[in-house]
């Protein structure tokens, strides 16, 4: 990179001088030498008098430029694109460029995935295709002609197919027209030889939509679940949000080389094959559920993202937070609401809180960005969804939907802001969201500390809530937020006590708006047990001195599943912390019998949904526990968690064994009830792997399994339990599946998480496994990402060898694929949270990377922020 990359600020937003209203693209596709012609209708905006048109462009070879059909030479190529001088107020601009898709390993712009041409333009990839107003507030009508060899039978782009024909030399073409104006980031093109699964969907207004899923040859039998998920998504969006699909065709293409999960390009979604391809022999239950969620997410973007897009990239959460909320609701309406909520909350409390506590802390609407791709974060997505969920909690479904309708009516066909969304919610509901808006501008995790007091004479129970958000690297000053705080009070017999404040009964959701606030509940006849932050009503940390007895009581008596799970997690947390301390003092570990009994009570309660029981019995991860401390003691945390797992396993061996056998299902299907049973059964197996019978049980399950869920569960249990059978089973699996990268990803992941002492050597050896390819993001994430992000004990080895390994990998990936590198670097950025010796090693790794020749913007931004600390 020539110059030091510069930052953009939200406050500097300015509309462009010109707009492009129509663009006609022609692609003459050749692997190393693709010719792109863009004919743009350009209009100067009324506020401007400019005569220079500034367009973005990267890695482009400019062939010719014409204004109104006449060659134009008054231009200058710049670092970020082109400045075209002396242009009129309205004109046709023709730009001819050459690009090289084959050499494009960044997987941004136009590239090749296993021989097929495909594109990825969000956030700023379109500028690698042609010079353009590559910003989300420029909405244009696209017409696209794709010319290629007939060996690429499918030639696809956005919108409707309007014409096709043959040209000489065995080449053919197809022309597409998208009637909906869109920003360039939603442009897509695909050319390849695929198998196609076809179906139709009739919308509620009676229009028939053609549905087509394009997969690699031979994979048709793995595409049915994706189609089912698509039809369910279309139906759900009509029923719950009243939103109907608009084009005559909806296409999904699955590709193996893809930087993220999927992309919502108008009418032509491009998907990571991981989120399309599944059959019981190759995919786990989690894969099936992931497909449903991601297909839903991309489909829901058609309204929240495509029809209404973002004015600028700082508004990303406008479409992402809202669409995550919508996909979470979709999964919850179709499956178990409690289990979905639990898993979403685990992500916020674990990795999202960790992001807040690290150098990349930012509000859901960032203020400053160097590389936009770095801001597709857990904060923008998951915390962004929590912010929408809080609005939903405060307004209720009816008013929330009224707000949605107003937002859609008012902003359809435009590029909007987060503020526009809040205004619509406010106007439609009559709620005052003035203070609530701070959730958009303030970064960091708020912490709530609660104190309670029961006055037996006055029969009052007072609840004092204090809130504090600690300073983050990006923002020193914090203000009090509007926090919906959902509570319930119980009598000793489990009865729900009515909530009465100042003589009137109130709803469960309290409005916490001040730094400290006391709520005095009246007519409370006995000292109650309080359940707080029910449903995780706000993305905050909660501090309250519960006794073990109170938590065990809530595990049984709280009226909603989430609160019962949360009580179980708090009980575990207390004892994990205690054992971390014992480990540091080199004392003997301990876990009271009453705690074990509480979990045994859950396991043996036949009335509970099996998947919920599985969640109750699942301990927080090492990384989540690390986040509870300012300085994480990796070894003590691993020891404490290991002890608790082992103790629960040994003490509950009988009920675990009984459940394990009782939950056996002869046949496999992907119905939610079957998935839930397998989940609990495999949770039992993971515990049983730590007991004497473990090795035999795991081997037997691996051998008799008729589906990938049980196979991987057996391997996972062998891996975490460090069982003697591990090596044989892992070798057997690799022999069987080495031709299939997607399946091998599960195996690479297990190698990454391997708790054995030689894990790093084994991981390094897999870099030359026939199924590994550093250019494939899925392979990198599963092998390198899991080792660095999910194997803290080995990654943080005192020798520093884990850090050196990551630095080596990042050095390679910086030039192969900066976006992948930038995802993988995250564990190294958090050096402040480790002891001094580790900090030194991690910091010196970052310093080494900072000196790389040609350091990509993506890594530059993160490394510099981290080193600034
Ligand atoms: N909008 C895309 C993500 C684009 C990421 C660009 N680096 C997928 C999604 O959120 O649906
Ligand atoms: Zn999205």
Image (cartoon, helix red, strand yellow):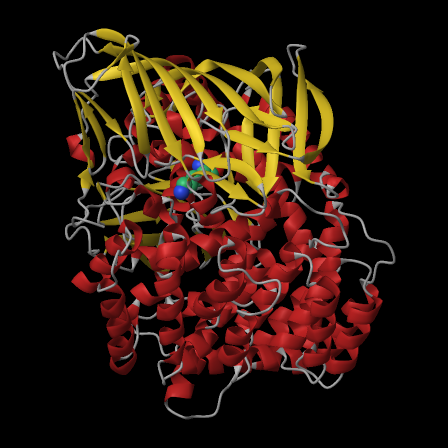
Q: Quadrant of residue 581 in the image?
A: bottom left
Residue drawn at x 54%, y 40% as measured from the top left? 328
Residue drawn at x 63%, y 75% as measured from the top left? 719
Q: Residue furthest left?
A: 49
Could you tell me residue 664's position as x and y percent? 83, 62
Height in image: 10 above or below 244? below
Residue 237 appears in the rendering: yes
In this rendered view, identify the residue nearer to me: 644 or 491.
644
Tell me the quarter of the image containing the C terminus.
bottom left
Could you tell me residue 18's position as x and y percent? 23, 16
Instruction: Determine the quadrant in which ligand 1 lies.
Output: top left
Could you tell me residue 28's position as x and y percent? 49, 26
In this rendered view, identify the residue nearer to me: 719 or 643.
719
In this rendered view, identify the residue nearer to me: 742 or 445.
742
Q: Report whether 179 appears left or right of 127.
A: right
Residue drawn at x 61%, y 15% as measured from the top left? 164
In this rendered view, identify the residue nearer to me: 787 or 173.
173
């Amino acid at each position: 990179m020539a110059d030091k990359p510069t930052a953009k600020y939200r406050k500097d937003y300015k509309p462009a001088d010109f707009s492009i209203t129509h663009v006609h693209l022609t692609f003459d596709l050749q692997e190393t030498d693709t010719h792109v012609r863009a004919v743009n209708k350009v209009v100067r905006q009324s506020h401007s008098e400019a005569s220079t048109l500034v367009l973005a462009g990267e890695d482009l070879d400019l062939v010719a430029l014409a204004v109104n059909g006449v060659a134009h030479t008054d231009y200058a190529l710049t670092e970020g694109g082109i400045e075209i001088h002396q242009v009129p107020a309205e004109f046709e601009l023709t730009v001819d460029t050459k690009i090289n898709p084959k050499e494009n390993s960044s997987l941004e712009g136009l590239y090749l995935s296993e021989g097929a041409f495909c594109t990825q333009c969000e956030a700023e990839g379109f500028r690698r295709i042609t010079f353009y107003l590559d910003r989300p507030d420029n909405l244009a009508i696209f017409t696209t002609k794709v010319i290629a060899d007939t060996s690429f039978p499918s030639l696809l782009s956005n919108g409707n197919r309007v014409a096709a024909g043959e040209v000489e030399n065995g080449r053919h073409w197809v022309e597409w027209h998208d009637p909906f104006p869109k920003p360039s980031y939603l442009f897509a093109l695909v050319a390849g030889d695929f198998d196609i699964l076809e179906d139709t969907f009739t919308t509620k207004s009676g229009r028939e939509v053609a549905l087509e899923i394009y997969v690699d040859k031979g994979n048709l039998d793995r595409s049915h679940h994706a189609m089912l998920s698509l039809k369910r998504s279309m139906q759900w969006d009509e029923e719950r949000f009243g939103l109907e699909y608009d084009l005559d065709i909806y296409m999904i293409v699955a590709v193996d080389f893809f930087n993220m999960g999927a992309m919502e390009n108008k009418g032509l979604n491009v998907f990571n094959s991981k989120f399309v391809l599944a059959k019981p022999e190759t995919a786990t239950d989690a894969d099936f559920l992931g497909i449903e969620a991601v297909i839903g997410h991309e489909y829901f973007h058609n309204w929240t993202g495509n029809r209404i897009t973002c004015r600028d990239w700082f508004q990303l959460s406008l479409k992402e937070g809202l669409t995550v909320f919508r996909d979470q609701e979709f999964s919850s309406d179709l499956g178990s609401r409690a289990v979905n909520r639990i898993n979403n909350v685990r992500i916020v409390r674990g990795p999202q809180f960790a992001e807040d506590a690290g150098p990349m802390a930012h509000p859901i609407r960032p203020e400053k960005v160097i590389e936009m791709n770095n801001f597709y974060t857990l904060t923008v997505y998951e915390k962004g969804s929590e912010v929408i969920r809080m609005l939903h909690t405060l307004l209720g479904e009816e008013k929330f939907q009224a707000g949605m309708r107003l937002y859609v009516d008012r902003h359809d066909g435009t590029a909007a802001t987060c503020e526009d969304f809040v205004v619509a919610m406010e106007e439609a509901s009559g709620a005052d969201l003035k203070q609530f808006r701070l959730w958009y501008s303030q970064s960091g995790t708020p912490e709530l500390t609660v104190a309670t007091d029961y006055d037996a004479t006055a029969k009052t129970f007072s609840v004092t809530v204090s809130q504090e958000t600690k300073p983050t690297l990006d923002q020193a000053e914090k203000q009090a937020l509007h926090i919906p705080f959902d509570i319930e009070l119980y009598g000793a017999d489990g009865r729900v006590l009515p909530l009465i404040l100042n003589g009137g009964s109130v709803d469960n959701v309290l409005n916490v708006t001040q730094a400290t606030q006391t709520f005095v509940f009246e007519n409370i006849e006995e000292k109650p047990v309080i359940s707080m932050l029910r449903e995780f009503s706000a993305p905050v940390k909660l501090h309250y001195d519960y006794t073990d007895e109170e938590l065990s009581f809530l595990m049984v008596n709280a009226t909603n599943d989430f609160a019962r799970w949360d009580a179980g997690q708090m009980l575990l947390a207390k004892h994990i912390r205690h054992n971390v301390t014992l480990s540091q003092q080199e004392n003997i570990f301990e876990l009271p019998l009453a705690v074990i009994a509480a979990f045994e009570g859950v396991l043996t309660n036949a009335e509970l949904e099996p998947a919920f029981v599985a969640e109750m019995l699942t301990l927080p991860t090492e990384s989540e526990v690390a986040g509870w401390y300012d300085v994480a003691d990796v070894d003590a945390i691993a020891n404490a968690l290991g002890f608790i797992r082992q103790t629960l396993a040994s003490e509950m061996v009988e009920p675990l064994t009984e459940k394990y056998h009782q939950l056996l299902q002869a046949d496999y299907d992907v119905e939610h009830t079957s998935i839930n049973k397998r989940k609990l059964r495999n949770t039992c197996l993971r515990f049983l792997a730590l007991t004497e019978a473990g090795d035999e049980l795991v081997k037997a399950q691996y051998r008799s399994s008729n589906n990938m869920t049980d196979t991987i569960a057996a391997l996972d249990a062998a891996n975490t339990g460090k069982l003697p059978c591990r090596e044989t089973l892992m070798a057997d699996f690799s022999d069987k599946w080495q031709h299939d990268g997607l399946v091998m990803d599960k195996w690479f992941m297990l190698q990454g998480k391997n708790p054995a002492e030689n894990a790093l050597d084994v991981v390094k050896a897999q870099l030359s496994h026939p199924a590994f390819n550093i250019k494939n993001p899925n392979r990198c994430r599963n092998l390198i990402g899991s080792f660095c992000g999910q194997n803290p004990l080995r990654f943080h080895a005192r020798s520093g060898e884990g850090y050196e390994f990551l630095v080596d990998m990042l050095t390679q990936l910086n030039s192969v694929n900066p976006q992948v590198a930038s995802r993988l670097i995250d564990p190294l950025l958090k050096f402040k949270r480790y002891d001094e010796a580790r900090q030194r090693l991690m910091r010196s790794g970052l310093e080494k990377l900072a000196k790389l020749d040609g350091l990509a913007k993506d890594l530059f931004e993160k490394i510099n922020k981290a080193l600034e600390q």
